[in-house]
Each structure stands twice: as structure tokens, then as C-alpha cells.
Amino acid sequence: MLLNTRQKFYLTKYLYLLRSILVPHPIRGCHKFSENSAVRSSCIRKAFIDYFKYKHGHVFVPSSSTIPHNDNTLLFANAGMNQFKEIFQGTVFPDSSMSKYRRVVNSQKCVRVGGKHNDLDQVGRDCYHHTFFEMLGNWAFVDYFKEDAIHMAWDLLTNIFKLPEDCLYVTYFKGDNQSSLSPDLETKAIWQQLGLPEDRVLPFGSSENFWEMGNTGPCGPCTEIHFDRLGNRDASALVNQDDPDVIELWNLVFTQYDRDTKGKLHKLPSNNVDTGMGLERLVSVLQGVTSNYDTDLFRPLIASIEQVSGVGPYEGKVGISDTDGIDMAYRVLADHARMLTICITDGARPGPQMQGYVIKRIIRRATRYAVEKLKAPPGTIASLVPVVVHSLGGAFPELTKNPEIVMQIINQEEQQFLKTLEKGKRFLQKHISKLGSQKTLSGEVAWKMYDSFGYPIDLTNIIASENNLKVDMEEYEEERRKSHEITSLGGIKNQQKKRMVTLHAPDVEWLKNKKIPVTNTSAVYATNYSESNSYYSPDVKTRIIAIKAENNFVDEVGSNVECGVITSSTNFYAESGGQIADIGVIINDQSLNCLNIDDVQSYGGYSLHSGMSKAPIRVGVEVHMHVNWEHRINVMRNHTGTHLLNFALREVLSNTSQKGSLVASDRLRFDFNSMETLSTEDLQNISDIVNRLIQESLPLYTSSMSIDKANTIPGLQAVFGETYGDEVRVVTIGQIINELMSSDYTGGCSVELCGGTHVENTSHIEKFIITSQKASSSGVRRLEAVTGAFARKAESNGIALQESFKQIQQQVSSCLQNSLVNSHRLLKDLESLAKIVDKTSMCLSLKTKLRQEISANRNSINKAVKTSFKLQVNEMACAIVQSIDLNHGRKYHIHHINSYNEKKEVSSQRPCTAIMLLSSGMDRLSCYTLVPKELIQVGVKANEWALAVNHLINGKGGGTESLCCYQGNMFPIDQIIAAAEHFVSSKVARVSDL
């Protein structure tokens, strides 16, 4: 019986649970930090969270996604503080729940496979680096600082987890003269006050004890706590030396600075605490094992791999003792299974760039280790997903929702790679064998491995390393640039326009210190709909309270200056939640346009209106804020259309959810999870639902309420990747919000958390047309659509192209009935029309239909031309044969033809005749000679015969004694025939038996 993916998932999970009951894994050498609890990883995680939650009043905040949807400076969440970045920078919205955080604790899902923190190359080589790990952390925002943070950490480790004090070593920041940073002697003194001797309080530089999330952002000095697994010795010299027995356990970061894009450090608005301790390392210490892979976080995965491996059990060997790399392969596969399960659940999909490229690399890396090193069957990686879900699903419930989708995505990517794995391997081994004593593999070969066989560069580096080789990475990068693949290797690509003016953390702090209030944005939603079927809103009269230009706040700017203006109130929508910002102008008291606003961003509640000044602007003057309403209305239509599309998709498809969106003025874009391309029927059903809701003239309702109350609304949809404050705005279509919350509500309404701008009634959208569908990444589809005037234009485009096609189709019918007259021109017309259809914004269903009909007409013409041509060839061949027969007795024949296609037919019917065929066209003349074996033996050779005329046409070509071809310039045919006759007749005349 064949099992589908879901059945395989539950069967695997059942077998795993059964095995865990019948054959429990013994935990060796446990540190029993609590008399009433077993030292399982889940208990350790809970003990950490409970210590800060109940003993020190911290709020537990669930882990954020590993995909930082609102932070384009990171590929993946790489530290626990990522989701609190706005707090550190002072840009958090004042009314959000995050702004109220003072003490926080959690276990954050972290991935380190790129950028400043990249552990990928070390995974499997040792026993403590991972691509995915859990970061246990506690934070203090404008609350406690160094002393309390250090005391809490020491108390938890020594009194709760019962770690021996003499096995603990700590480090502190020794300062950096280049950055003008002094030593952190305060931290050193605190540790010594706790009783640590000076030889266990060690100074280190910026690379070890100045923590930075990335190239920009919050940072500060840190103190690390290291643990000596062996004990009873002085291990101070082994701290920070990558010794597997002396490991970093906990890092306490004192976040005091913010690094800008130029590398300059600025003091943060307030001092904060950000600590991080890897759960996997802590568990290994408390479970008394020296390897993270021997803990209960990894042993079930190792055991599952052992069941399908064809190379024997895992032995835990590392380095030179792992001679065949088998144990490294076990570790890599176990690690990658966790990372893939977590990240794909969070929305990452295999693709050509950014997170997608990393996921593709990890799957292919794991596939190579599974298939080649462990001799495991295809599907092994996906079979580990249920084991990961069982291990981590309690801490991260989202893992339990759709694990079969995760398995399906992994299997699809694995199958694609397996198709080229062996070819790539043979190609690489061929080039390695040619190197001889050389120790460097060329970057050109490495790029070919990626470009042609799908081998990520790190996988080629691994194989090269296994053969004691290095890859020429400079040459590889050059090949990459030549192939215009710069963005395909996972680099962060910011598709937004570069903003010339922004606010950084020190800027926001400056505004606060000046007692400048945040921008009043209540007028953003104050719109009216007139009887003339148009929206309008009076300009907002306000006052300029701050101007930023050239990275500084200034009192005034002149004309033609790129600047940002903050006003006390505004009616401009700031970019947020996938909706682009409003555009417009600021008008001064002389009714002059003084600033063209082309971007609006919000920083900690301050709306920064950016653009080019058109007249002098000064702080303190009164101005009028004028929104471009044509732009705003188009955005409003598209945003409400996005909500209707989301609703329609969930009506047509099962188990789908939003994965991203863009609301612009000329179109809307919507990403959603789906493993298959939507059929024409599905697309039509979705369009029909949206347009029906538009025609029903449904009113929109908005209401502000607490997030807790909003979560009780049936069918509520939150935007993927967005974070929400305590107060949220709920937008419903066609149903009053209070009615939604009644006990007899049965659904059938769009209801979403949304802070964007919308039309008041669905009829104002006018029309909705889906214009394109494509894959955004593996398992994620992307629809684009237009509304209003853009939809009408798309509709008229479709009608015009339909009419153009009908005209060409009539000509095609006439062509097919009248000896293919104008067939060549019609093929060009159809090709041209196909290109226009591809580029034109129009209904996708109509576009698909036109593409099919254009293709069918081209095929009809090509088929008819081919049939006609074949008939012509046969007729020509018969004419040539008849001509040969009329010259009975001659052993050669020269003929001027339309093409060479007759040669096969003629030579097969008259195999004993030497034949020269001459073809002219397109200002070129070609000569083809064919001589049978019998005549070659008596001196008639095809190449010599062709050369006898080639001097006339000055051609290029060549051939053998039996077959030859030359192509050259046009020349009178009768003269060529005469030269050919002269050559061959003299040869034949000398043969007496001819």
C-alpha cells in the first residue's frame, strides 16, 4: 500500500513514540539540579524561564520567527535580542506592548548561517556548533544593569543548576583604543566582589567581548561565563581557545551603543541588558556529556538516522579520529534536520536568493552527506521532521501545525538535487584528477559546479577539503560576477529605494530630550467620500517641529536640499504593513510648495516626511500638508482589494495563509502558501468571488480594541510577519465587528488586523483583475492584481489584443487555404503578438488563453509549411531523378535546386551517379557534391569536384572524397555549371568502362 505524505508523517511519529517508550535512552552522569525533576532539556528550558519569570519578575515573550520580516539587515534571527531591536534603538511605537517591556525572558529560535555570525562551516566538525540553536535569554530595558545581571546569572548557575564554582571562568572587555572604548573595569570589579579570584576574571578584546548583532545596530561590551567540563585544574589559558572541554556557556551583553552605516558608535538612549545562553550547551553540561549530540535534543535524531544508515552506528568521533567522516555526517544531518524544520515552518522556502538560497544550500548539503557518506535512501532528511517536531513542538507549538508540508518541501528540493548530484560529482573528480601535485581547485570549476550542477560553494569546499585541496575563491567570485549572479548567492538584497534621510536611535533620543512630542497621526484616516464619487480630505494645518538634513538636525534649509521634516501632526500615511507611503507636498504660508514628499517613515512615533525642498523651510513655521489623493485612492483600492483576495483564496483553497504582500498605487501583490500552481478554474473562482463582493457594495468597518479582545473574533487574519501592540485596529468587510463576536456568527466575512488605509465601500474598488501568477519560492505562490482605473486599462488591453489576434487568425485561415501565401510574415506577426501579450498588463486567464491560441496557430502554420515543403522536396527529387534518367548513360549530374533537402531522396534513388547540387538564396550560393564509391575508385572525388567551382564563389567549407560542401558568394549559375561540367567530364572521359 502506498502512503501519502501525511500518512507517512503520522506513521513515523507513532513509531518514534513507540521506540522512545520501549527503549528509553539513558542519560549519563546527570547533574540533578532539582530533586523533583528529571534533567531533560525541556525541564532545563523551563527552569531557566521560571527562574527569571517568578523570582525576578520577568515577562515571558515567545520566540519570534527565525525569518526577520521587518528587518532587512538580517537573513535570519541570529540572537534573542533581534525582536527587541526597536527597544534598544529607541524607535519602538509608544503605544505598543513592546514599549512597556522592562524585564523579559524567553528562549529564542536562532539561526547562524551567514553574515557576521556564521557557524555553518564548523557544524559537524566539532560537537557544539549548530546552524539552529535555542538562545535562552533575559533582558532589561531601562531597568537593572551590570550588577544585577551578573548576580542573577551567577545565582542561577551555581545555586539552581548547581554548577561547581571552581569550573567557571569569566571574561570582560579590556577596551579598544581604535574605537576609543575604555576597559570595562566595573564588570571586573563586580565579579571579584562575588568572590572570583583575579586569575578567573580574564580580559579580552573586541572580537570576544564587544558584541554586535551585525554590521549596524545595537552593540556593547559583554562578559562571558565559560565552563570547564573537566575541573580540578587551572583552565584559564584554555578560555576562548576553541577547546571542546572549556566552552562559552553564557554571554551577558551590556547594550550601550548603536553603530551606524558608517561604522560610527553612538550612545543609546538608555543602558540595557541582553544575555544569551545556548540551550544545547547548557543541556550537555547538566546531562554530564561532552557533546551536544549526546543530549536528548539530538540522540533521538541520531538514533533515527542509524536505522536507515548503511554504514554502521554513530560513534561520536571528531577530527582525525573520524577518518572516514561518517560521524561528522551524522552530526551534520541531525543539525540540518532541526534547522530546516524550524525555518521552513517559519516560512522560508528553497529559492535563488536570501533565505531561500540558504535553505537550498542546507538541503543539498544534507542530501550529499546522507546519500554519499551515510548511504541513506532518498527521503531520509524529511523522515527526521517528525522527530524534531516531537522534540521541540512543546516549546514551539507552530511546529505541530503542518509538518507534512515541511517534509514535502524538503523532498522536492532533494529530488531536484539528486538528478545532478552524480553528474556534478563525476565532473569535479575529473578536474581534481587533473591537478596532480597542485593543491588549488580553480574558481571556474567551482562556479561550474554551482551554475550547472547546483552544488553550493560550501559543498564544493567540503569536497575539496576532503581531497586536501582549496578552492580559488577570488576566481570563483570573478566567475560569479561575470555570470551576473551577484544576488543569487543569498546576499541581502534591499529592493526598496535608498533613503537619503533616516532617523537613528540617537536622533530619536535627541527629539525626546527636546521634549518634542510624537507626531499626531489621527488625520491619516480622516477621509470623506463625496457625491461626485471621489475621496477627499482637507489639508492638515500644522507646524514644523524638526528638520533633518546631512545627518544633522537643522533649524532651516534652502531650496533643492534632500531633507526630512517632522511636523506636529500629519495626514500622510507612513510606510507600514506592506503598504507604501503617501506622497504629496508641504505648502508654506505663502501658498508655495516648499517640499515634495516622496517617502514617509515612522521612527518611534515620529513621522519623517522626506523629499527635495522647493523653497526655504524653517522650524516653527506653520504649513499645510497636502496628500496626493490620486495616489492615495489607488492605494486604498488596492489595500481593500488585498483583503478581498485573501478572503477569496481561503474560500477556494484549503489550508492556505498569507506569506507577504505589497500594496502599491499601480498594483497589489499577495504571497500565500501553495505547493501547486493555481489552475485556470481556481483563478477564475477567486476573481469571481472578489468581483462579486465588489458588486455587492459592502461597507467597511474599523474598530480599535485590545489585542486580547481581537484574538477572540472568529476568522481573524493577522498579517504574516507583523508585530502588534496592545491596541490594534480591526478591519472588517460587510459585517459590523460586534456582530462578528456574537455566538451565532457562522463566518463568511473578511476580518483582519490592519493599520492601512481603505475605501469605505467595496464598490469603490470598481473592478479587480488578476494579472500574473508565479512562484515566489518553493511552496509559496505570488499573485499580482490591479483595481480601479488600472483594472479598466488591463481589461481594454485584453480586448485590443483579442481583436489583434482575431485579425491575424483570419489571415492564418486564409493562408492555410491558399498555398501558404504570406506564411513567413504571419509567423513573425504571431511571434510579435506573443511578446506583446507577455509584456502587457491584462487578465491572466485571457493572457493564458491568448498564449495558447497563438501557439496553436503557429503550430498549424509550421505543420502545413513542413508538409508542403516535404511535398515540394519529393517533387523536386522526382524531377532531378527524371533529369538523370533522360541523360541515360551519364555517370554524373549537375542540378540547380531550391534547397539541399532533395539530396537524400536523389542519392538513395540513384546511388551510382555522381551528383552536384547548387542552391542560391540570401545573397549566398552553396555547392554540394556526392560521389559513389565506384567513381571514387576511378578518380572522381567529391572534394576535388567542389574545389573546381569554389574558386568562382570564394567559398568556405570542405569535405571528403565522397561528400563535400562549400558556401560562398553569388555567381552566374551557368558559368558554375560549365566549370563543373569541364572538370567531371574530363575525368569520366578517361575511364573507358564508363
Image (cartoon, rainbow, N blue to C red):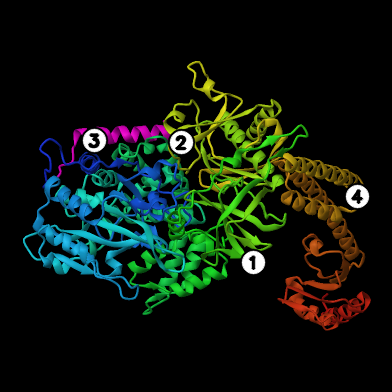
Sequence-first tag of 1 and 3: 3
Badge 4 amino acid: Ser
Residue to which mark 3 is pinned: 19
Sequence-first tag of 2 and 4: 2
Residue 819's tag is: 4
Question: Residue at 78% of width from left, 64% of height from top?
Answer: 907
Label 4 to label 1, Cα distance in Å? 74 Å
- Secondary element at tag 2: strand
Within 10 Å of the Cα at label 3, are there few (<14), some (14-19), or many (20+) other Cα atoms? few
Label 2 to label 3, Cα distance in Å? 47 Å
Residue at far top of view:
744
For discs 4 and 1, the disc positioned in front in the rendered view: 1
Residue to which mark 1 is pinned: 558
- Secondary element at tag 3: helix
Using the image as rendered, state which of residue 9 and residue 549 is in the foreground.
549
Q: Is residue 242 visible?
A: no
Using the image as rendered, state which of residue 253 and residue 243 is in the foreground.
253
Magenta stretch? 1-28
Sequence-first tag of 3 and 4: 3
Label 2 to label 1, Cα distance in Å? 40 Å
What is the count of numbered marks? 4
Along the horizontal axis of the image, is 815 left or right of 114?
right
Residue 727's tag is: 2
Within 10 Å of the Cα at label 4, are there few (<14), some (14-19), or many (20+) other Cα atoms? few
Sequence-first tag of 2 and 3: 3
